[in-house]
Amino acid sequence: MDLRTYYPRSLKIQLGPYVHLSRIIDKCRAKLADTLGEYLYPCPLDSCFLDFTGISSERLLDAVSTRTDQAILEWLTQQATVHTHEDILKWNTMMLTRGPDSEEKWSYFLEVRNSIDPHRHDITSWSDLLDLDEAREVPLRKTPTQ
């Protein structure tokens, strides 16, 4: 898989109880195949997942090297920090709505968003920006001024 011509799955896709896991798996496989291109593993969003699950980036990379998506999910279920279903749902919501957390990151975010579509003022989360950047459809959301 070459991420320079093939985008990883959307952060929004859920594998087992987790959003973002399938995207991280795609990025790990690309890293292992030396086809990661401009993508980073682990990026800050990957680190949020890794911190939440208590799995290091190296351990996940090693697990991905020999397992299918389903086997990775089973391995993760055995290895990850135990969380309640409600905690995972809250974490998923946080990941899907998370936006930049500093002025510097907002500047970068707006620069990228505006270079893709300067009219999409409704895009305020990293997950939506990634989908927009990777040419996936992002439904128009109402903004407070609409």
Image: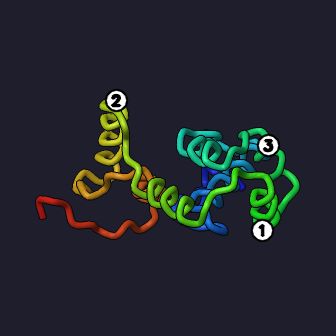
User: Of tags 3 and 2, which is closer to the observer?
Assistant: 3
Residue 6: tell me if it is visible: no
Left or right for 24, reference 145: right
Mark 3 and mark 1 in contact (Cβ < 8 Å)?
Answer: no
Q: Quadrant of residue 123?
A: bottom left
Residue 128: tell me if it is visible: yes
Q: Which residue bears the numbered disc 3?
A: 59
Instruction: Please report the residue visible at 32 percent of the width from the left and 37 percent of the height from the top.
Output: 106
Q: Position of residue 142 (x, y in %)?
A: 21, 66
Q: Which residue bears the numbered disc 1?
A: 70
Instruction: Please report the residue visible at 62 percent of the width from the left and 42 percent of the height from the top.
Output: 51
Instruction: Indicate the amino acid at tag 3.
Output: Arg
Instruction: Indicate the amino acid at tag 2.
Output: Glu
Q: Of 138 and 67, which appears nearest the observer? A: 67
Q: Quadrant of residue 1?
A: bottom right
Q: Of 107 and 117, which appears nearest the observer? A: 107
| N-term mark: 3 or 2 | 3
Mark 2 and mark 3 in contact (Cβ < 8 Å)?
Answer: no
Q: Position of residue 126 (x, y in %)?
A: 42, 50
Q: Which residue bears the numbered disc 2?
A: 104
Determine the secondary structure under disc 3. helix
